Amino acid sequence: MTLDQMRMLVQIAESGSVLAAAENLHRTQPTVSVAIRKLEAEFDLQILDRNSYRATLTPAGEALYRQAR
């Protein structure tokens, strides 16, 4: 887990989307998506629910977000 990944997670949670988080962080959307996927792989859990149009935090993602804050 890196500080950059935590910042990305916080931005996703607070802005409501991966794209908005990327814009706020001056990164590309694929960069943010890949960083979150790597974080998911590292902890072997799903942080984002990608089943709808907008990705939302799972309960595990919410818990990780609270710790990151």
Image: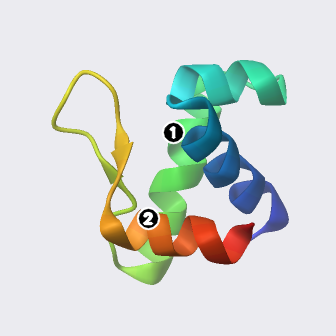
Q: Is residue 17 left or right of residue 60?
A: right
The percent position of residue 20, horizontal first and vertical second, equals: 62, 21
Vertical comparison of 46 with 51: above or below: below
Earlier residue among tags 2 and 1: 1
Check disc 1: other Cα within 10 Å, few if <14, some if 14-19, many if 20+.
Answer: some
The percent position of residue 21, horizontal first and vertical second, equals: 66, 30
Q: Which mark is residue 33?
A: 1
Q: Is residue 68 left or right of residue 57?
A: right
Residue appearing at x 75%, y 66% in the figure: 69
Res 15 → quadrant: top right
Check disc 2: other Cα within 10 Å, few if <14, some if 14-19, many if 20+.
Answer: many
The percent position of residue 24, horizontal first and vertical second, equals: 78, 24
Residue appearing at x 51%, y 39% in the figure: 33
Res 2 → quadrant: bottom right
> What's under tag 2, amino acid-wise?
Gly
Q: Residue furthest left?
A: 51
The percent position of residue 8, horizontal first and vertical second, equals: 69, 47
SS class, disc 1 = helix
Give the residue at mark 2.
61
Vertical comparison of 43 with 31: above or below: below
Q: Is residue 17 visible?
A: yes
In-front residue for pair 55/29: 55
CA separation in Å, label 2 and label 1: 14 Å
In-front residue for pair 26/67: 67
> What's under tag 1, amino acid-wise?
Ser
Q: Is residue 1 visible?
A: no
